[in-house]
Image (cartoon, helix red, strand yellow):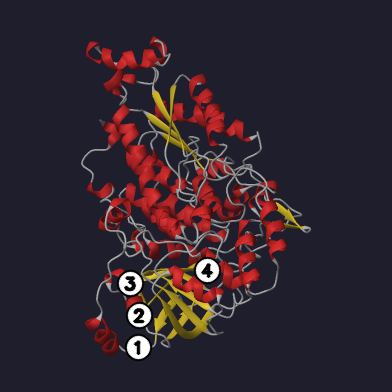
Amino acid sequence: MTKAYGKSILPSRHVTEGVERAPHRSYYYAMGLGKKQISQPFVGVVTTWNEAAPCNITLARQAQVVKKGVAAAGGTPREFTSITVTDGIAMGHQGMKASLVSREVIADSVELTVRGHCYDALVGLAGCDKSLPGLMMAMVRLNVPSVFIYGGSIMPGKFRGKDVTVVDVFEGVGQFAAGKVDEAYIDELEQVACPSAGSCGGQFTANTMACVSEAIGLALLGSAGAPAPYESRDAYGFASGEAVMELIKNKLRPRDIVTRKSLENAAAVVAATGGSTNAALHLPAIAHEAGIDFGLHAVGKIFKRTPYIADLKPGGRYVAKDLYDVGGVAIVMKELLDAGLLHGDCMTVSGKTLGESLAKIKFPAGQDVVLPVKKPLSPTGGVVTLKGNLASEGAIVKVAGMKNLHFKGTALCFDSEEEAFSAVEKRQYKDGDVIVIRYEGPRGGPGMREMLSTTAALYGQGAGDKVALITDGRFSGGTRGFCVGHVGPEAAVGGVIALLKDGDVITIDAVKGTLDVELSDAELAKRKAVWNPRETDYTSGTLWKYAQTVGTAEKGAVTHPGGKAEKKIYADI
C-alpha cells in the first residue's frame, strides 16, 4: 500500500520514515497504530464539532464514518478539530465581532495542525457559516488532496401549520416590539423553530456555502443535500474517505479543482439559488488562497448574468430540505449547465468533470422549488453588487424575493449596531429612511458584524419594504429587505459612509447596480478634511490582531498575502 500511494514523496515521510524518526513513530505506537498504519498515508479528518449550536453537534459522529472510508481505502485517518463561532448565538451583541474572524482562525488552525504533523491529505466536515469557507480556504492553501463534506441542514420547524426557521424567531422579536404578538407567541415559536441537529434551514450562509462546495468541485455531488439527522449522510462520509485516497493516488489537488472557471460556477449557483451575500466575501477569500483574483466585482458579473431559479427562504418559500427532496443542488447545476451558464469541463474531487458528474441528472417535473432557466423567478441573480460615490470599492444586496429594486431616501446615521437596534426597537425611524450603520467593517468593527437582529426587527415591525439599510458590516444569509452590506471603503478608513449626516439623500438602484449620495465632490472633500479616525474598544487580543492585518471586503477580508506570494506550497515539502 505504501508503494501504491507513493509515501516516499508525501509530507508524512518527515514523521514516519527512517531511523531518525523513531521518536516520532513511538508516539504513533502509543496511540495504537501498527507498522502498517504508520507506513500508510496520513489523512487529517478535521471537524468543527462543538456543543455551541445544532449546526455542529453531529460532526464528530459523521467523522467516524469518514475515518472508516479512509481506512478501507488504505489510509490512516488522524482526527482533529477546529473552532466554530455560531452566528445564531453570536448575533445581536458584541460576540458577533468574533464570527468572521473565526473563518481565519479555522483556516489558520487547520494549516498549523497539518504543517506540524505532516498530514498528506484532508477531509473536512463543517456546519456553521464561517466554518465551511474556513475549511475550504485551508484545503486550497495547503494544496494537499482534500474533500469537503457538509454536516447537513436542520429540519424545518413546524409552527401553527407552516414551516419555520430561526429567522422567523428573529423576526418574531420585531413583531413583539411592534405589539403584533405577545410573549406567549414567542415562547411557543422559539421552542419549535429548530427541531433537530443541523445548520439553519433556509438558503442562508451555511446552505449557500454547502451548495458552493459541490459547485466548486471540492465536495462529492449530492453530499450537501441530506439533512443532518439523516443517516443516509453516512454513505457520503464513507465515500469521501475513499475519494481522498484516490486523490492522493492520482495526485489531484485542490488547486487543480479550484480554478477561475470553478469559482465562476460557484458564483452562478449562489445567484441561481438566491444565496447569501456572504458568498461574495468567501469566494474571493478561497480564490485568494490559490492566487486567483476573483473579487467582489468579478463575482458580481456572474451574479448579473445568472437567472434566479430556486425559490428558497429567506426571499422565497422553501427550505433546504425541500431542495434536497427534489434532487438537491445538482438539479440547479444541471439546469444552468444545459443553458450554457456553467463550465462543464471543471474537474471535481470525484475524478470526473462537473459535466460528466451531472450527465445522468434529470430536471424533475411536477415541482416548483427549482424553476427552469427559461421561466426564472427573475432573469438576473438573487444577489446584486453595487458601486457609486458612496461605495467606490463596492457593496452588495440580496434582492431575492424583492419587488422594488430602487430606493431613494434620507440617511439616518448610527455609529454601531447597538445604537441602530435600540432606535429600531423604539421605532425611532420613519418610512423612507435609509438607516446607516457604520464603523462595523472588517477593520472598524473589528470583525464586520452581521445585522440580522436589526433587519429582522424591521421586518417584524412591518417596515421591511418601507426603509432601507446600508452598512460597512455584513448581513446574515437570513436577512431580507433592502439591506446593503460590505460598503467600501469602510468608515474606519474614512470611506464616504463615515462622512454621511442625517438627512443626506441616498439612492440605491439594484437594477443599474449603483449606490450614491447626493453630495458634490467638494462637499465630500470638506467633510473628509474634518473627519477623524475612531479607535475601537478592542486594543489587544485576537480582535486587535485581526484589525491590523485584515484587508477590504471587496477582496474577501483576507489577512495574508495569499497564493500569489507563495514561494513553496506545503504539499511540496
- Residue 389 shows which numbered tag? 2
State the image coordinates of residue 568 (x, y, percent, origin top left): 23, 38
Q: Are marks 1 and 2 in contact (CB under 8 Å)?
A: yes
The residue that appears at 54% across and 69% down in the rendered structure is 455
| Amino acid marked by disc 3 | Ala
Residue for badge 3: 491
The picture places residue 501, in percent across and down from the top left corner, at 38, 84
Question: Residue 315 location in percent, x, y?
Answer: 61, 65
- Ranked by sequence position, the earlier of labels 1 and 4 is 4
For the residues labelled 1 and 4, the Cα–Cα distance comes to 27 Å
For disc 3, the neighbor class at 10 Å (few under 14, some 14 to 19, many from 20) is many
Q: Is residue 389 left or right of residue 195?
A: left
SS at badge 4: helix
* Residue carrying label 4: 454
The correct choice, above or below, for 524 with respect to 128 in the image is: below
- Point out the frontmost of discs 1 and 3: 3
Q: CA distance from mark 4 to mark 2?
A: 25 Å
Label 1, label 2: how far apart the Cα atoms are = 9 Å
Image quadrant of residue 470?
bottom left
